[in-house]
Image (cartoon, rainbow, N blue to C red):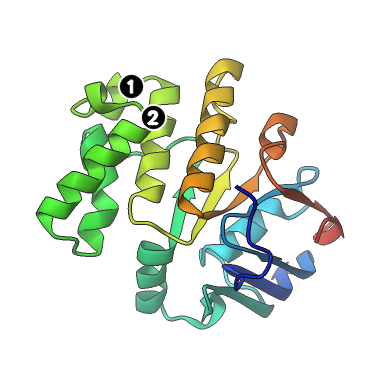
Amino acid sequence: MAPDRFAPSVLNVAAVVKNYGARRVLDGVSFTVGPGERVALTGPSGSGKTTLLNCLGGVDRPDAGSISVRGTPVHTLDSVALARLRRTEIGTIFQFFHLLPTLTAAENIELPLQLINVPAPERAERVARALDRVGLIPRAAALPGQLSGGEQQRVAIARALVHRPGLILADEPTGNLDSANGANILALLRELSDETGTALVLVTHSEDAASICHRRINLRDGRIVSGG
């Protein structure tokens, strides 16, 4: 499904600057991402990709410029409002999965719904549907330590999407997987993004991962050099 070029942007980044001490890590970064659009952030190590992703998710705050998700200015929110925005509008997928080791696959997926007080019957229905969509119903009761890397990443994807966010932020989601599992995860991300209309911003060094995206934004020395 092609993104709707005329729909309001899910993500708007305008003239973002981030410094660490005397070093400028992001220098005037601007771009938008529409509903259902997949954008790869590429560039050499140290180009600012992960710092930019952290700013998009509110982990870091820019020193100048603005970032908004579905019209809400991320960079101005206090900690309570930022937590609320993350719980409702942003899903995150990490290279090393970041599943809670004492919770089952189903419980890890359910956690975002508990945090926004979704009623128990609806939680159960949405978790079951998510497990089915990522092909893990037989593994619902397994702990992360009992799952393969590919299975853990599928749980992480289901967890990132179960609360129906407008934006998914993914940091090298196939970086800890072999090529076969990585290809499966990329196919799943592409399919789910198409199905749900969720925007995806993907930090990657992988040509295969970048190829599932509609466009690429290439960073070098904290600046966009192509694709912005």
Horizontally, residue 104 falls left or right of residue 165, namely left
Say the numbered circle drawn on residue 167: none
Label 1 sits on a secondary structure element that is loop
Q: Position of residue 48 (x, y in %)?
A: 73, 55
Residue that badge 2 annotates: 152
Label located before the other in sequence (2 or 1): 1
Furthest residue in direction left, as rendered:
121
Mark 2 near mark 1, Cβ–Cβ under 8 Å? yes
Identified at 11% across, 54% down, the residue is: 120
Q: Is residue 188 above or below residue 71?
A: above
* Mark 2 closeness class: few <14, some 14–19, many ≥20 residues within 10 Å: many
Q: Position of residue 173 (x, y in %)?
A: 55, 37
Residue that badge 1 annotates: 147
Identified at 57% across, 61% down, the residue is: 35
Q: Quadrant of the C terminus?
A: bottom right
The amino acid at mark 1 is Leu
